[in-house]
Image (cartoon, rainbow, N blue to C red):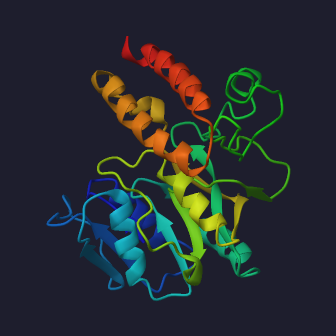
């Protein structure tokens, strides 16, 4: 299931699915209300293009997931790439346990380096967690989410999963709207992970499954850095409330993030 705005990169993601060693029963492509795909795509018979009833990535995703009929459901962003064995590697883990969901290891498209390059850095651990403990795959005491930059095992249990690619058992899908905001869905993956864990479903990273995503540093629009940050801070405050994280940690991490924005602004 792919939530999309119908931009050019959708066709590349679809081609990755078509070339997969596992053939899908269906691919649901969900657009916002009254939106059409902006370019010609290679559309197979099992591709269903639908429009959600409400705007927003989370609303689109939930709308599309409700239409899924298979016992195993993969949620994908529309701008990711992967090799033909990624889906197979994920589903091999998923089918062994009814109370898990799985995600791949994230790499940068342009370099094939780990997407989360500083998850175990001395400096990040010190300012965001006031400790030197490796927090890969965890949410720190200050509410900051750490990705995984390296792992010695193929399967690793995490405290949160990025929303760009998660394989679910259909019975474990979150189909109620957990994100009460419009526009870009900052921190939605943290809220989504919380809802999944509340159902006693484990969040697993599968290292052998690799997903290639855009480097965020290449997507930054300098004129919108502060505008986007202020919007993200508002959503982050809501997330902290859901996780019952003390507000003094919110103000501390927000200050650090605000100051770090200057390197992108100038």
At 43% from the left and 83% from the top, the residue drawn is 68
As drawn, the residue found furthest toward the left would be 34
Foreground pick, 97 / 227: 227
At 80% from the left and 59% from the top, the residue drawn is 154
If the image is split into quadrants, where does the N terminus sit? Answer: bottom left
Q: Is residue 74 left or right of residue 183?
A: right
Residue 192 sits above or below residue 93 on the image: above
Q: Is residue 237 visible?
A: yes
Q: Is residue 82 visible?
A: no
Q: Quadrant of residue 62?
A: bottom left
Residue 260 location in percent, x, y?
51, 18
Residue 177 location in percent, x, y?
41, 66
Foreground pick, 12 / 164: 164
Residue 144 location in percent, x, y?
62, 37
Foreground pick, 82 / 252: 252
Q: Is residue 211 left or right of residue 67?
A: right
Total marks in image: 0
Foreground pick, 168 / 114: 168
If the image is split into quadrants, where does the C terminus sit? Answer: top left
Residue 40 sits above or below residue 222 on the image: below
At 42% from the left and 61% from the top, the residue drawn is 13
Q: Is residue 201 left or right of residue 16?
A: right
Residue 116 location in percent, x, y?
63, 38
């Amino acid at each position: 299931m792919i939530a999309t705005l119908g931009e050019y990169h959708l066709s590349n993601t679809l081609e990755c699915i078509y070339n997969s060693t596992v053939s899908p029963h269906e691919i649901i492509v969900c657009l916002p209300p009254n939106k059409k795909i902006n370019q010609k795509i290679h559309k197979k018979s099992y591709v269903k293009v639908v429009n959600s009833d409400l705007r927003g990535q989370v609303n689109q995703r939930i709308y599309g997931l409700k239409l899924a009929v298979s016992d195993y459901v993969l949620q994908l962003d529309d701008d990711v790439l992967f090799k033909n064995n990624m889906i197979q590697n994920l589903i091999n883990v998923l089918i062994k346990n009814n109370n898990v969901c799985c995600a791949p290891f994230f790499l940068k498209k342009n370099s094939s380096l780990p997407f989360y390059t500083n998850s175990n850095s001395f400096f990040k651990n010190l300012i965001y967690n006031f400790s030197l403990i490796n927090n890969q795959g965890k949410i720190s005491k200050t509410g900051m989410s750490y990705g995984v930059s390296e792992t010695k095992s193929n399967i690793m249990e995490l405290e949160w999963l990025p929303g760009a690619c998660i394989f679910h058992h259909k019975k474990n899908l979150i189909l109620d709207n957990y994100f009460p905001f419009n526009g870009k869905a900052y921190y939605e993956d943290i809220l989504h992970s919380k809802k999944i864990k509340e159902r006693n479903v484990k969040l697993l990273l599968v290292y052998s499954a690799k997903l290639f995503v855009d480097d965020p540093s290449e997507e930054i629009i300098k004129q919108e850095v502060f505008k986007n940050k202020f919007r993200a801070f508002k959503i982050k405050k809501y997330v902290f409330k859901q996780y019952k994280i003390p507000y003094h940690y919110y103000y501390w991490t927000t200050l650090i993030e605000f100051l770090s924005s200057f390197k992108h602004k100038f």
